Image: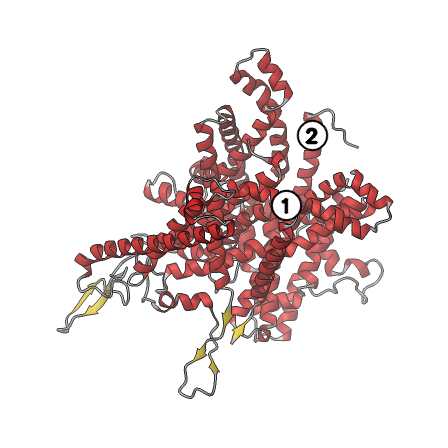
Amino acid sequence: MYAIPILIGVNIITFVLFFVVNTPDDMARMHLGMKRVSEAAIVKWKDERGYNKPVLFNHSANGAKKITETIFFQNSVKLFIFDFGRSDSGRDIGYDISQRMWPSLAITIPSLIVGLLSYISFGLILAFFRGTYVDISGVILCVIMMSISGLFYIIGGQYLIGKFLHLVPISGYDTGLNAVKFVFLPVLVGLIGGIGASTRWYRTIFLEEMNKDYVRTARAKGLSELRILYRHVLTNGLIPILTGVVVILPSLFIGSLIVESFFAIPGLGSYTIDAINRQDFAIVRSMVFLGSVLYIIGLILTDISYTLVDPRVRLN
Amino acid sequence: MPVIFITDFLIFLLLFGSIAFFLYARKQEHLTAPWKEIKKQPLAMSSAVILSFFIIFGLLDSAHFHPRIETDEKSENVYSNEILSVLDLLLKDLRLKTEKTYSAPLASYSFSKELIELEDGKKIRDYPRLLYGGANLDNPKTDSTSDIIKRISLGFLYGLLISSVIILLIIFSLSKVRNEKFIITLKKCLSKNLETNWMSIFITISILFIVIAVIYHLSQNYHVFGTDKVGQDVLYQALKSIRTGLVIGTLTTLVMLPFAIAMGLMAGYFRGWVDDVIQYLYTTLNSIPGVLLIAASILLLQVYISNHANDFNSIEQRADLRLLFLCIILGITSWTGLCRLLRAETLKLREIDYVQAAKAFGVSNYKVMLQHLLPNVMHIVMISIVLDFSGLVLAEAVLSYINIGVDPSMYSWGNMINSARLEMAREPIVWWSLTAAFIFMFILVLAANLFSDAVRDAFDPRLREF
């Protein structure tokens, strides 16, 4: 139930950032050109976007309108009922979001599933061969891959697979089943980009489990090492992994900002980046709010999933 | 005439701060013991050498000044508007040797065909000779390979010579400090019998000096990493970017450190409503997606800069402010992790007897936190500083790519990648800018990762990877 005060806090921060530190007059000047811009043009620009109201308190209105006819109420409070309003270029943000979340999901969900499966199996393999050359060289490889910039994987992947081997298109998106060939490369790049850090992390989790007493008991009972790994270590190690995954589940909607804009996928990530580049404050504001709502949903889901996987934890 | 940017000031503040901390920590047994552990590890020591080379480059690049214009009358000093750093002076050749446009690494001919007028007045389309690349050769098509090989071997020899002199000097001073005969110290170093793993340090130093000498000899006559669109040497850009990377990696942590430490300690120590407020604060900040917060703040900064255009004397100053601002924003988005760790640790520590005893003696809250709690959470702070570093260097490149990173006029690996990306479609491909940026970033981040692993293992054995 801590969700509501946090959302209010987020709202106030975005409000202060976008309307107090940076007044609508500045925004108008930014859009209309910096130097030579007339007062009338600014007033007109603000008029069209509804930024012409007082910031917090409207003295000229009557009754309840004193509060509602303000920028704070019109642009910030309305976010709570997911009324995003119109972007600074006049499009309906809510409609855009509902259109653009599907391509984002088409990239992020396969990445998540494929990534999770392969990272867990790599982690298990390294844990199984712990202390041998397989393990050591695996860890060294992980550290090296961690140290390479994610941009390298994206550019390298585009060049090698898209341009050199001509297997899939370099970038773009299509509807329906045709989307598969566009989704392939971003998913692959995302997978390779995350391999270093994740595999090392999962390996640590599995090794921690392996040092626990119940594994020793299982060994003493004469179970084979493989069976211990799959039946005991994997199932127990999944608890921290799954709770980590649940947090990021809701944020999948936003997609990956960088991957989407590199591969020209019309998802929410590239939507946000376009808005940043076009300096469309209304969209950035909505996305900040949406992002934090999803993050908080993730936190709540984590709490619930804790109680599901570990009955000793109780919600109060 | 020296010019001091805000980030320069902070960098030197950080430098003196770390020296002071080093002097302080030398007397503290619990802080020196882990470092002894680190000194024994070969990988950690090699990365430390590499990191210190990067730091030297960064520091040289942080001392800025207006160069004096040479005039006839000696009495009057005239300063140019240009702002240079000490590194620029050292790399004068690289900085001033600009070509017309793209040229490949070690090339003698331009990358693109141009209309050339021959001596007899005929015009042909061909690859023109470069202004500086291979300029000493009469016939680069046949001679350039042998010239390059000659220069590489010359550089190799010089590098070997310089590094062995330096290594012998180190051993000599070591033997003086240890009051031993030179030959005994030498033997001990080779057989790894000292507390510090000198062998790996020496190997890294020789490799680094050889590489630097080879590159130096090549760069006398070639562009080692080629040139970019406006003909500027890519190697120079990559070297200038070191400072940006280091500033982002270190100043961000420096900016957030006071908040994180104060808030974390207070939340854990006072509990109750203070804890609630601080927890609320960092959960709220955490729930805003970091990239979006950075984007929003950079947008605001752009508005501010364009509204106050007169406050800035130069482009460099504006870029510097943006860099500092980026550090602060990155700090705001990243202090929550450290704060949470410190809070958890303080919650544990405050129940331990010595803290309870101090409270029973009537020691003030402030003093308990400063004298009893802070020194005991210092290892967490140190671990998080080194762990954050590599992530921040990589983040800079990504942020610059979506135009919310450092100022486009500033040299940074992200900007290099960003501008080179537009040339990916060219045939044949312009690959050297990207490669140079990725190589430099990779070396820095790999060294930082290896070093931070060693620091973490030494300071917090529980976290050690098995």
A175 is higher (above) or lower (below) than A42: above
Q: What residue is rendered at 34% in x and 61% in y?
A: B227
Q: Which mark is residue A19?
A: none
Q: Name the one closer to the observer, B284 or B387.
A: B387
Left or right position of B34 against B48: right
Q: Secondary structure at mark 2?
A: helix
For residue A201, side relative to residue A162 (left or right) = right
Chain at tag 2:
A
Residue occupied by mark 2: A306
Where is mark 1, residue-wise? B31
Residue at x 49% of width, y 42% of height: B194
Q: Position of residue A273 (x, y in %)?
A: 54, 53
Q: Where in the figure is residue A6, as x and y percent of width and height?
A: 74, 47
Q: Nearer the viewer, residue A205 or B92?
A: B92
Report x, y in % for residue A99: 56, 44
Circle 2: residue type: Tyr
Q: Secondary structure at mark 1?
A: helix
B181 relative to B18 in the view: left or right: left
